[in-house]
Amino acid sequence: MREGATEATDAEGRVEVDPDLFPTLVGEHDCNLNLIERSFGVRLVTSGSAVVVQGGGDRVRRVVQLLRDLVESPELCGGGGELRVLIERLAAEPGARLHDLVAHGVVVGKRRIVPKSAGQVRYLEAIRDHDMVFAIGPAGTGKTYLAMATAIHALKGKEVERIILARPAVEAGESLGFLPGDLLEKVNPYLRPLYDALYDMVRHERAEAMLERGTIEIAPLAFMRGRTLNDAFIILDEAQNCTSDQMKMFLTRMGFNSKVVVTGDITQTDLPSGQPSGLVESQAIMAGVEGVCFIHLEERDVVRHPLVRRVIAAYARHEERSRQSGSRRGVE
């Protein structure tokens, strides 16, 4: 343990912790305290079951508040990538508070799934306040995962009777004939990410039972044609690969007491060159329609490995240079 302070500091704060909770708060081999130190540029010193914060005045104030919030939400102190992302975001956004993120969290079973950026908070608020939400942003921003968590929460709270999860089965026209196996075997590889998100939140046996009963349905987008979906939480994933006709067809499946969330990344469409994306078009067509909300998530909302954010930024710079180069050639 880190006992005693030896260096001069600008300010100091102290957080008393319940002795039984103290090991959870500091983490194995002080990993949580080390993470906070690196992220905020402070020094943390343990004194009995208290943590003393030393450093610049504003940083000390923010870390003291963070530690108090962690004491109130010890389930977040398990370490690993999730806590790291939360702390890094709080360090990067001076106005953000862990308490506020937790307050917007979604309870799924014994877990509380917490938004990890201001953009994700806006996303969850939009789902709560609107019947139809479009979430547009790069990979790793939690578009599908948070929608899934909200859907399961709504199902368990008896706000809806079923969950419908849809995806374009393959690029553009959903041509499955060339794949081996029966229909289920053909489409399952394309729906696998939805199963992965479901199994991450619901025990496998429980999820399988819900799928068998039809309480949760995972299907390719083509299966939505001709249906009216009442009392349902409906999610369309990878919507950038929908054609205009497919998007219109899907949006008009919505029935009474239903909620629709459409997610996609308009920078990664797999449609044939020259064919417009239904998701891109929807931004102009649906803008201003009452009950519809568009949420745009950005690079800073990526909650995967930090390297993913850097990869997305690198590709964005490359694409911008390519566009500028093409513009110059056009002028010449």
Image (tube, grey):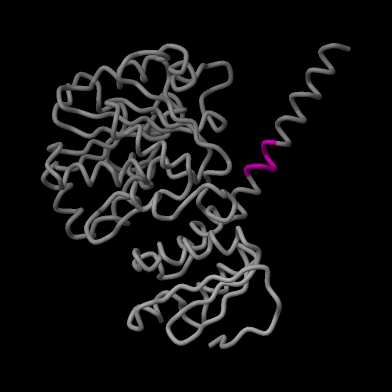
Q: Nearer the viewer, residue 214 or 109?
A: 109
Residue 116 location (% of width, % of height) = 46, 50
Provide the major secondary structure of the magenta segment. Answer: helix
Q: Is residue 253 magenta?
A: no
What residue do we see at 52% from left, 79% from top?
30
**Is 322 located above or below residue 288 in the figure?**
below
Q: Quadrant of residue 2?
A: bottom right
Q: Where are the magenta residues, as a range?
A: 312-316
**Is 84 located above or below residue 139 in the figure?**
below
Q: Is residue 324 left or right of residue 12?
A: right
Which quadrant is the C terminus positioned in? top right
Q: Is residue 325 left or right of residue 220?
A: right
Q: Quadrant of residue 110?
A: bottom left
Q: Residue furthest right?
A: 332
Residue 34 location (% of width, % of height) = 57, 74
**Is 307 located above or below residue 261 in the figure?**
below
Total numbered circles: 0
Residue 286 location (% of width, % of height) = 39, 14
Q: Quadrant of residue 216?
A: top left
Residue 18 location (% of width, % of height) = 34, 79
**Is 329 located above or below residue 81 in the figure?**
above
What residue do we see at 52% from left, 16% from top?
275
Q: Is residue 313 magenta?
A: yes
Q: Nearer the viewer, residue 5 or 207?
A: 5
Q: Nearer the viewer, residue 148 or 17?
A: 17
What residue do we see at 20% from left, 53% from top?
207
